[in-house]
Image (tube, rainbow, N blue to C red):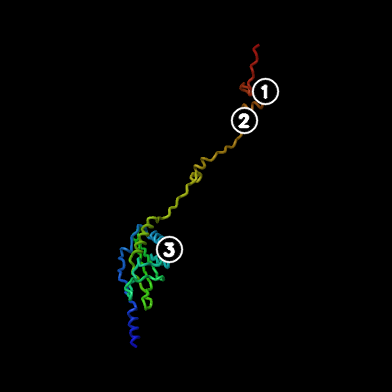
Amino acid sequence: MRASIWGVIAALFAAGCFYPPVTQPPPDEQQEVVIPLPYDLAWDAVNAVITENSFHVQAQDMTNGIIEAVGPRFTLHDADCGKIKSVAGTYTAEPEPNSSSVYNFLVRPRGPEASIVKVRATFNSSVKVPLQQATDVDCVSHGVQESDLLREVLAQAKKTHRPVFAKPNASPQQAASPASARLSAPVTMRSQPRPPSSSDKASRDLPASMQGFSLNGHSNMPNLPAPPPN
């Protein structure tokens, strides 16, 4: 009987105790930033950062500016999951392999040419306490991941612009106006028959022996040497 009592007492002393995290959440100014982009471009910039970090988007609503994305496993550098006390001493609770990190992005317009972007991180992990069942713990963020993501959003905002569509150069034929096109077109002249002159008519009335001479005294034949004087 006495041995069993001492066994129970030893088990109680061997059983560990869990102390919840005492870290204070980061202030709002460390979880939000204003970027010089209108709402639609700010939305694109945030999605680009999510893609670059290989986050898995679980839900998004552009109308309300909400994006929920799952990130990789977090570490003690990212969040505080509390402490465990046992016979071996007090030590920090480590995130388990099945831990999860969820990032909630909120995008809001701030005037026509600026937007505000907020990031809230939620870290969760099971904590194993000696001789007790595993405890599911909401770990408190140190604000490290949120600050890093907001810096990436600022950097991405500098590279985000509206697409510019260049107008194709008009060819000379397209640029020419219809009037100039008509002016530049070659003009085709139809040959019209020349009305016969009086000299032509008179020449046709001459006998065949005089057809080579004109009525005005000039020969239509090539010039011949003048005959020698008598």
Q: Earlier in the sequence, mark 3 or mark 1?
A: 3
Q: Which residue type carries mark 2?
A: Pro
Which residue is more in the foreground, 35 or 55? 55
**Residue 2 at x, y percent in the picture:** 33, 87
Q: CA distance from mark 3 to mark 1?
A: 109 Å
| Whether residue 169 is situated above or below residue 74 in the rendered picture | above
For disc 3, the marked residue is 54
For disc 1, the marked residue is 210
Q: Which mark is residue 128?
A: none
> Which quarter of the image is occupied by the C terminus?
top right
Please identify the quarter of the rendering in which residue 197 is found. top right
Which residue is more in the foreground, 175 or 157? 157
Q: Residues within 10 Å of mark 3 (few under 14, many from 20)?
A: few
Q: CA distance from mark 2 to mark 1?
A: 19 Å
Q: Which residue type carries mark 3?
A: Ser
For disc 2, the marked residue is 196
Which residue is more in the foreground, 94 or 199? 94
Secondary structure of the residue carrying numbered label 1 = helix
